[in-house]
Image: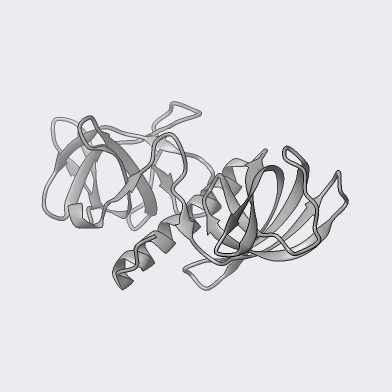
């Protein structure tokens, strides 16, 4: 799990119990420090867990209290099974989203604004303007403007690589893989995709 703020630290904890709207966990340890961390009440977080039969799931939560059992436990909100998002464990979940981006290719020296056709925390597919020549495996930079659920806009400048070009609905698209993504940037990408999935689910849209 990780806090929903500028802190890049991730945490791990054991689940002690779950009821209808609460989840009880051991005091978390920092993944990198392996030391117990203190988190305040009302701290908002993204949490994930793995069920051996069903797979990995992600949900939003916050700390709402503490209890003393055989060991001290944190009490988190639990949104219910119907609000869990399943995570594809070998690849990032792709969503249909039109996001403004600008792509700069190093080999062909092409620079052009475009829009995404689909998007994930690991890469995206963008519309390729006519007369633009790209090469498979070509490296470049992509500037992405993420309209976050909070109303703010996050600007990311990422290294990237061209994976392939393909046709879809009479348009030419190109798949892009993000490279050298920092931890904070990865969190921002994943949070954007997570919030979009929740938004689409509430609207009854299948991505």
Q: Does residue 190 sit above or below 207 in this rendering? A: above
Residue, far left? 19
Query: Which percent across, then down, holds residue 189?
Result: 54, 52
Q: Is residue 98 left or right of residue 114?
A: left
Q: Quadrant of residue 52?
A: top left
Residue, far front? 170
Q: How is the image coloured?
A: one colour
The residue sitting at 47% across, 43% down in the picture is 92
Q: Is residue 79 left or right of residue 146?
A: left
Query: Which percent across, then down, holds residue 157?
Result: 71, 53
Q: Does residue 141 sit above or below 172 in this rendering? A: above
Residue 27 in sight: yes
Residue 80 in sight: no
Q: Does residue 202 sit above or below 139 in this rendering? A: below
The residue sitting at 34% across, 67% down in the picture is 205
Q: Is residue 26 left or right of residue 132?
A: left
Q: Quadrant of residue 49?
A: top left
Q: Quadrant of residue 173?
A: bottom right
Comparing 168 with 196, the one in front is 168
Question: Can you say which quadrant of the picture contains the N terminus?
Answer: top left
Query: Which percent across, then down, holds residue 200?
Result: 36, 66
Q: How many marks?
A: 0
Question: Can you say which quadrant of the picture contains the C terminus?
Answer: bottom left
Query: Which percent across, then down, holds residue 121?
Result: 53, 48
Comparing 111 with 81, the one in front is 111
Comparing 191 with 142, the one in front is 142
């Amino acid at each position: 799990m990780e806090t929903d703020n500028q802190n890049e630290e991730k945490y791990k904890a054991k689940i002690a119990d779950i009821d209808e709207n609460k989840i009880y966990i051991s005091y978390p340890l920092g993944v990198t420090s392996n030391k117990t961390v203190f988190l305040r009440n009302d701290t908002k977080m993204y949490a994930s867990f793995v069920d051996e039969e069903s797979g990995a799931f992600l949900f939003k939560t916050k700390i709402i209290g503490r209890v003393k059992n055989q060991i001290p436990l944190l009490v988190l909100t639990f949104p219910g099974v119907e609000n869990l998002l399943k995570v594809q464990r070998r690849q990032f979940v792709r969503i249909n989203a039109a996001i403004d981006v600008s792509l700069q290719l190093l080999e062909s020296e092409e620079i052009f604004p475009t829009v995404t056709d689909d998007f994930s925390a690991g890469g995206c597919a963008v519309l390729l303007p006519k007369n633009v020549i790209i090469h498979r495996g070509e490296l470049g930079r992509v500037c992405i403007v993420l309209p976050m659920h909070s109303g703010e806009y996050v600007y990311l400048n990422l290294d990237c690589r061209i994976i392939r070009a393909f046709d879809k609905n009479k348009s030419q698209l190109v798949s892009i893989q993000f490279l050298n993504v920092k931890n904070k940037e990865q969190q921002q990408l994943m949070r954007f995709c997570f919030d979009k999935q929740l938004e689409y689910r509430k609207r009854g849209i299948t991505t």
